[in-house]
Image (spheres, rainbow, N blue to C red):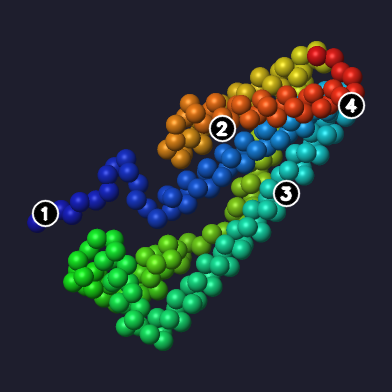
Amino acid sequence: MEARPGPHAAEPHSGGVGERLNWLRAGVLGANDGIISTAGLVVGVAGATSDNRAILIAGVAGLVAGALSMAGGEYVSVSTQRDTERALLLKEKRELTEMPEAEERELAGIYVEKGLSPELAAEVARELTEKDALRAHAEAELQIDPDNLTSPWQAAWASLVSFALGSLLPLLAIALPPVSLRVWTCAAAVVIGLVITGAVSARLGGANAKAAVIRNVGVGCLAMAVTYWIGVLFGVTVL
């Protein structure tokens, strides 16, 4: 008996792979936001004053406020998405109870649009409906996995932690060196951090890494330059 073909060894097909990649990508982007926003803040303050305590206070405040803001925003956003998913599933469940034949024809029509013949589509719809009608409609019609809804708490914690970790890089880089070197040290550390996050996010998304890195570093450097010179306008510092 011929063995049934399975997934390629290097090509995972488990249902959670896509979601794990999405959370990983969100974590990388959260760290990227932490690097850029905190770097802009501390460099701006360094442009206005040479007081290391003031720079540290501003950086820590930015880290805490940014991390909480990111976490709160993700929680609210993902909670709304989860509520929408639940509402759609309840609506679909009600329709399956009230008009099962029409729903089966609708499912068959979806597979016809995907390229199956009407006869094969009807057979597929019938077998999937017999096995788990709600799951079949949720996945084909709504692109929702009923057993794997989005988690607002997971999104909130991922954003909070990743933003905080990203923020630590410019904060430490500007706090530890001597006054004459701290802005340049911070800028160098931020560029390295942005190269890493840009390359990783591009790889996770299957995009061009070089373009992503250049764009990422460009935005970060622009943010630091603008905030530094704004800081200079309001105070005196030593480069």
Q: Which mark is residue 197?
A: 2
Q: Residue 35: x percent and y percent? A: 67, 33
Q: Secondary structure at mark 3?
A: helix
Mark 4 or mark 1: name the one nearer the start of the chain: 1
What is the three-letter code of the residue carrying label 4?
Phe
Residue 171 visible in the picture = no
Mark closer to the observer (4, 2): 4
Q: Which structural element holds mark 2? A: helix
Lower sequence index among marks 3 and 4:
3
Q: Is residue 226 left or right of residue 198?
A: right
Q: Nearer the viewer, mark 3 or mark 4?
A: 4
Tell me the SS state at disc 1: loop
Could you tell me the amino acid type at mark 2?
A: Thr
Q: Amino acid at mark 1?
A: Glu
The residue labelled by disc 1 is 2
**Mark sitting earlier along the chain (1/3):** 1
